[in-house]
């Protein structure tokens, strides 16, 4: 059974995947963190150094961006690909311009404020889902402001990976929450078009974090992708 490498989103850790690893047992799960270096390329290379020789790969949000870079660096090692609530394009200038002030604020001691005020309100379909919001804040605090800085810089300078996706011919899943604001539907339709063999799945009543917001349909989609 092919092992599965999971890469979570920005300022998240393995807890972001909720019950997915247990639901996919006995498949071997490798949790990878995009924390090494200050570029997406460095983070992808670090994960590849520790990954199995050949594997299935799933990434959400920033994790999906790192997954696409891994596909660019080592396409022969990736058997199948799941891109979730993510974006294959380079960062728009207006988003990149906000990175510097956010980094300064986080390094100045207000990481909680940055996450609470500027990022987490856009994550969930249900803003009253306090359990998920609290978990997001806990993951961010545990990672801390230095990881926030590295990940922000990496996202700011990321490459467009549309051509990389065009070349991938393995089983592919493109999945998003119906109400994802950070990574809207047109980005996922683009990835689906770039990989015509892929399955596009829209998870109802979910925002940017379907594994936590709507785990059952998310798990079902991942199981189908892994068994294709």
Image: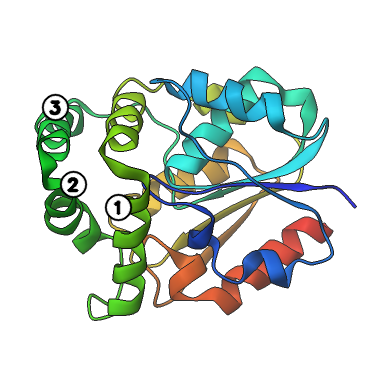
Residue 190 pos. (x, y %): 47, 41
Q: Position of residue 200 (x, y in %)?
A: 58, 57
Q: Nearer the viewer, residue 213 or 192?
A: 213
Q: CA distance from mark 1 to mark 3?
A: 19 Å
Q: Are marks 2 and 1 in contact (CB under 8 Å)?
A: yes
Label 2 sits on residue: 111
Closer to the camera in the image, 125 or 5:
5
Query: Answer yes or no: do the residues labelled 3 and 2 have beta carbons within 8 Å?
Result: no
Residue sitting at 55 percent across and 22 percent down?
A: 163
Viewed as shown, does residue 60 lie left or right of 152? right
Of residues 135 and 5, the one drawn nearer to the viewer in this rendering: 135
**Which residue was labeled with disc 3?**
100
N-term-proximal mark, 2 vs 1: 2
- In what element is the residue under mark 1? helix
Name the quadrant containing residue 92. Answer: top left
Q: Secondary structure at mark 2?
A: helix
Residue 178 can be seen in this image: yes
The disc at residue 141 is 1
């Amino acid at each position: 059974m092919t092992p599965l490498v999971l890469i979570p989103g920005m300022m998240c850790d393995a807890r972001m995947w909720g019950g997915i690893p247990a639901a996919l047992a006995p498949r071997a799960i490798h949790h990878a963190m995009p924390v090494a270096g200050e570029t997406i390329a460095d983070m992808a290379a670090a994960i590849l150094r520790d990954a199995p020789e050949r594997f299935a790969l799933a990434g959400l949000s920033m994790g999906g961006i790192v997954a696409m870079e891994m596909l660019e660096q080592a396409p022969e090692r990736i058997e199948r690909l799941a891109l979730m609530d993510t974006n294959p394009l380079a960062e728009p200038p207006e988003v990149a311009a906000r990175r510097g002030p956010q980094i300064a604020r986080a390094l100045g001691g207000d990481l909680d404020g940055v996450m609470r005020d500027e990022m987490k309100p856009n994550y969930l379909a249900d803003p009253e889902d306090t359990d998920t919001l609290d978990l997001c804040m806990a993951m961010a605090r545990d990672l801390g402001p230095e990881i926030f800085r590295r990940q922000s810089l990496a996202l700011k300078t990321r490459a467009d990976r549309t051509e990389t996706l065009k070349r991938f011919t393995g089983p592919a899943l493109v999945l998003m929450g119906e109400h994802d604001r950070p990574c809207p539907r047109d980005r996922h339709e683009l990835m689906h078009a770039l990989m015509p063999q892929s399955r596009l799945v829209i998870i109802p009543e979910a925002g940017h974090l379907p594994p936590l917001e709507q785990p059952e349909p998310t798990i079902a989609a991942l199981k189908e992708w892994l068994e294709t």
